[in-house]
Image (spheres, grey):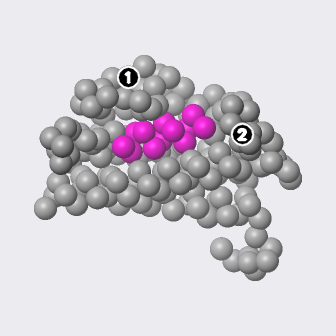
Amino acid sequence: MTQNASELTAVDALLESFSRIPELLHNVVDDIDADLLTTQPQLPDGHPGNSIGWIVWHIGRMEDAQVAAITDAPEVYADGWAERLGTPYAADTHGYGMSAGDVARFTVSSPSALTAYYDAVHARTVEVLQSTPAGGLSRVVDERWDPPVTALVRLVSVVDDAAQHAGQAAYIKGLLQD
């Protein structure tokens, strides 16, 4: 960022935070083969964990759904991404609450399709952030919580979740490649 730190806004901080996610995901996915992408690592308790591909798909679906909900706009996924990705889930599925068996069904047409979907989601997120009006981040977007959740808090949660999941994917890649 080129601005003086005293001039930074919440939108600037969110843009900087979200700008880190695509590189993290590309570093994990770009040189991976399709088999490794869908391999579920065995957890210490003997159960299968989430695959790299499923995690990256979930990051995109989670960000896509949350940004769409904040803007009352359709998800990027609605633009034919289910078909392009070749995932086995209903179009309204985001990965929340899925079992190991659900994750085991994950397929994707290619690693590059997976990152292309995330890149499209990221572009939408940047577009939304750049067009956020003054005070727009303080708008309440979810009243089910106490205190109610603002757009700012929801977006901080999204970038936090995405960064944590990207780290999980990178860790799994390291485990499976060694």
Where is residue 134 drawn, in percent x and y?
A: 86, 53
The part of the chain drawn in magenta is: 55-66
Q: Which of 30 and 24 is in front in this view?
A: 24
Count of labels shown?
A: 2
On the rendered image, what quadrant is the C terminus found in?
A: bottom left
Where is residue 23 drawn, in percent x and y?
A: 44, 61
Find out whether the residues at labels 1 and 2 contact each other: C-beta distance under 8 Å.
no
- Name the residue at 80% across, 74% down: 7
> Distance of mark 1 from mark 2, alpha carbons?
32 Å
Q: Which of 34 and 64 is in front in this view?
A: 64
Q: Nearer the viewer, residue 104 or 147?
A: 147
Q: Is residue 10 left or right of residue 111?
A: right
- Name the residue at 65% across, 74% down: 1
Q: Can I make out residue 26 in this image?
A: no
Mark number, residue 89: 1
- Badge 1 or badge 2: first in the primary sequence: 1
Name which residue type carries label 2.
Asp
Name the element at disc 1: loop
Q: Is residue 63 magenta?
A: yes
Where is residue 129 drawn, in percent x and y?
A: 70, 51
The answer to whether residue 27 is above or below residue 58 is: below
Name which residue type carries label 1.
Tyr
Which residue is labeled 2 in the image? 146
- Name the residue at 50% across, 23% down: 92
